[in-house]
Structure formats: structure tokens, C-alpha cells
Image (tube, rainbow, N blue to C red):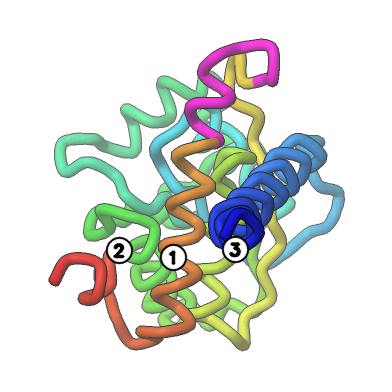
Amino acid sequence: MLLTLLVTIGLPVLCWSAGFLIFCATISSLSTEPPDRSLDAAIVLTGGSNRVSQGFDLLASHKVRYLLVSGVHSGVTLDDLLKLWGGDKKAIDPLDVTLGREAGNTIGNALEASNWIESNKIKEVYLITSNYHIPRSLLEFRHVLPATPLVPYAVQPQDFSPDHGVYWKTAFLEFHKLLVSLYRVLIHPDEKQPFPPSFIQ
């Protein structure tokens, strides 16, 4: 009885703990250095500090030709984003920047990006988001865009390190979002909502 209880409870806890530690080690080891390669485009997922600025930096330095900022609020303009960036506005051609306003979550980001990539005949892109968001973003984007090479560009949020409480809270939540996304992609591959039907029925 005791052995059965230990296996029933202990094994799942052990697997969860190992997975969480691997997740934390992965996001902490992601390079946040600006990339050297020049690609067709970059996609920025809004929702975290410094993400959009890194996209403008790539565009201004001619590392990419086009930029999609996905998940922009309806009241936000390109000029608003450029003011927050603080760089040289003359280095940014507005025609090279697309503000995507349809996405409300990471799945929506991937679907929005899919249409944009197809319309602009883009072959290879940088995917810019916070380091803790990279694993789930890559999962969602590679599911929707299996034929498009995606190069992750991780952004380090301010004060996001293991010696800050926000790190563990954010990592805990994001790890479980990743598990739900993985379940949905594997079991309900055609589902377009974050939570598959079996989670809410």
C-alpha cells in the first residue's frame, strides 16, 4: 500500500519537479545578445518590457527588412511605439512595419503571423519575446508554421532573475501554460483556443 502510494504520488511530483527545473534552466540559459545574422523579418510579441524596442533595433540596423508587432492595442500607433523606443525615427520606414491588432494570446500571435508571412513571402524570421515566453511561443509558432524557420531572440525583462520573487511566480505560471499548450497541440491540434475542450467541459 505504501509503495503504491509513493509511486502514485511521488512519481508525478518527481516528473513535475524535474520538468520545472529544466524549464527554469532553459529560460535562464537563453542568450539575450543582439543577433548577428540578417533575416527577412522579425516578429515581436507584445506584453513584456523591451520587446518592441529590440525589434526596432533590428530594423534600424538592417538586420531585418520587415517587422511585425503582434498584439498591439487598438489605440496604439506606430508613432507611440517609436517614442517609447527612443531611437532614431528616421531609421525606420513606416512601410516596413506592420502593427497586428487581432491577436489576444500566443495562439493568436501565431495565426496573425502566419497570414503576414504568407502575404509578404517571408522565408525566415526572428521571434522576439521575453525569455520565459520563448518555449511556449516556439511551440505555438512551429505548430502553425512548421515550414518557416524561426530564430528565437530572447529579451531579458527587468529584474527577472532567480533572486527576485517575480521570477519564480512568472516561471511557475508560464511552465503550466506550456504544459497546457503542449497537451492541446498533441491532443487537439486543430484547436484555436488556449484551453482545449477537455479542460473546460
Residue located 29% across and 45% down the image: 72
Q: Looking at the image, is mark 1 or mark 2 earlier in the sequence?
A: 1
Q: Which mark is residue 194?
A: 2
The location of residue 82, given as percent across then percent down, is 43, 29
Q: Amino acid at mark 1?
A: Ser
Along the viewing direction, whichever of 36 and 132 lies nearer the viewer? 132
Give yes or no for contact between labels 3 and 2 (Cβ–Cβ under 8 Å).
Answer: no
Q: Which mark is residue 114?
A: none
Between marks 3 and 2, how big is the CA–CA gap?
Answer: 34 Å
Q: Amino acid at mark 2?
A: Pro
Q: Which residues are magenta?
A: 161-171
Q: Which mark is residue 4?
A: 3
Give yes or no for contact between labels 1 and 2 (Cβ–Cβ under 8 Å).
Answer: yes
Image quadrant occupied by the C terminus:
bottom left
Image quadrant occupied by the N terminus:
bottom right
The location of residue 188, given as percent across then percent down, is 36, 84
- Secondary structure found at label 1: helix
Answer above or below: position of 2 versus 108: above
Residue at mark 1: 181
| Residue placed furthest toward the right | 36
The location of residue 170, given as percent across then percent down, is 49, 31
Residue located 45% across and 78% down the image: 185
The quarter of the picture where residue 50 lies is: top right
Between marks 3 and 1, how big is the CA–CA gap?
Answer: 30 Å
The answer to if 39 sits in the magenta stretch is no
Residue density around tag 2, few if under 14, some if 14–19, many if 20 or more, within 10 Å? some
- Secondary structure found at label 3: helix
Between marks 1 and 2, how big is the CA–CA gap?
Answer: 7 Å
Q: Looking at the image, is mark 3 or mark 2 earlier in the sequence?
A: 3
